[in-house]
């Protein structure tokens, strides 16, 4: 029985279950071998506790075996509470992540539909350009006023609205200076 006492581990059982089993083995061991000393009993009990509980208990001042058991109960309760809280926080984060993802999907799909219908029409199957309404490519009419005889940049309605400003064509000139033909004086020509 003394050997079983030394091999007893808490494992997944509660402190109450471990303590009950430990006391049972101590009683049978004491009957056969004589009573265990208080220190020896405390050391064997602490050695069999779950690692996290044993660590929490070993950091405290312990007066006797009963005090050790009470501190083990307290450590177990604190650790269990912290674990449950951690699980709850992680679940909230996971749930919020799912909620946030659903919002993104809804936002994207509603923005996508809105953008597709109002801002960016689908490409025209006839000319390949993006425009709304009927394609005027093969009709020979102005794209702006839909009248024949002129194109958009020559449209009188377009010009009256200032639409043709800045669309005139200009010829550019480029001047170069050859450094070898200059005189030695540093006069600037303005």
Image (spheres, helix red, strand yellow):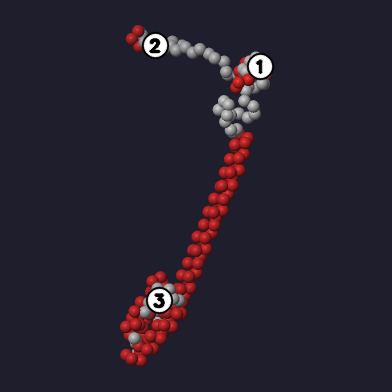
Give the image location of residue 159, x and y in percent: 64, 18
Q: Nearer the viewer, mark 2 or mark 1?
A: 1
- Relative height, residue 164 to residue 78 (above, below): above
Q: Residues within 10 Å of mark 3 (few under 14, many from 20)?
A: many
Q: CA distance from mark 2 to mark 1?
A: 50 Å
Q: Nearer the viewer, residue 170 or 145?
A: 145
Name the residue carrying label 1: 148
Name the residue carrying label 2: 177
Residue at 58% from the left image edge and 49% from the top image edge: 103
Q: Nearer the viewer, residue 37 or 50?
A: 50
- Relative height, residue 154 to residue 67 (above, below): above
Residue at 54% from the left image edge and 54% from the top image edge: 98
Give the image location of residue 41, x and y in percent: 36, 83
- Relative height, residue 21 to residue 117 (above, below): below
Please report contact status of discs 3 and 1: CB closer than 8 Å, yes or no. no
Name the residue carrying label 3: 10
Q: CA distance from mark 3 to mark 2?
A: 95 Å
């Amino acid at each position: 029985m003394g050997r079983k006492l030394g091999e007893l581990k808490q494992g997944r059982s509660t402190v109450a279950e471990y303590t009950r089993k430990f006391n049972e083995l101590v009683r049978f061991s004491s009957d056969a071998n004589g009573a265990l000393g208080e220190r020896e009993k405390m050391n064997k009990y602490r050695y069999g506790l779950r690692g996290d509980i044993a660590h929490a208990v070993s950091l405290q001042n312990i007066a006797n075996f009963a005090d050790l058991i009470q501190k083990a109960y307290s450590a177990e309760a604190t650790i269990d509470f912290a674990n449950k809280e951690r699980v709850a926080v992680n679940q909230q984060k996971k749930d919020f992540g799912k909620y946030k993802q659903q919002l993104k999907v809804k936002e994207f799909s509603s923005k996508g539909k809105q953008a597709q219908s109002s801002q960016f029409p689908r490409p025209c199957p006839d000319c390949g350009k993006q425009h709304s309404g009927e394609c005027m490519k093969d009709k020979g009419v102005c794209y702006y006023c839909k009248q024949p005889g002129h194109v958009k940049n020559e449209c009188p309605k377009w010009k009256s609205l200032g639409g043709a400003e800045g669309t005139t064509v200009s010829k550019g000139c480029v001047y170069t200076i050859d450094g070898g033909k200059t005189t030695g004086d540093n006069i600037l020509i303005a």
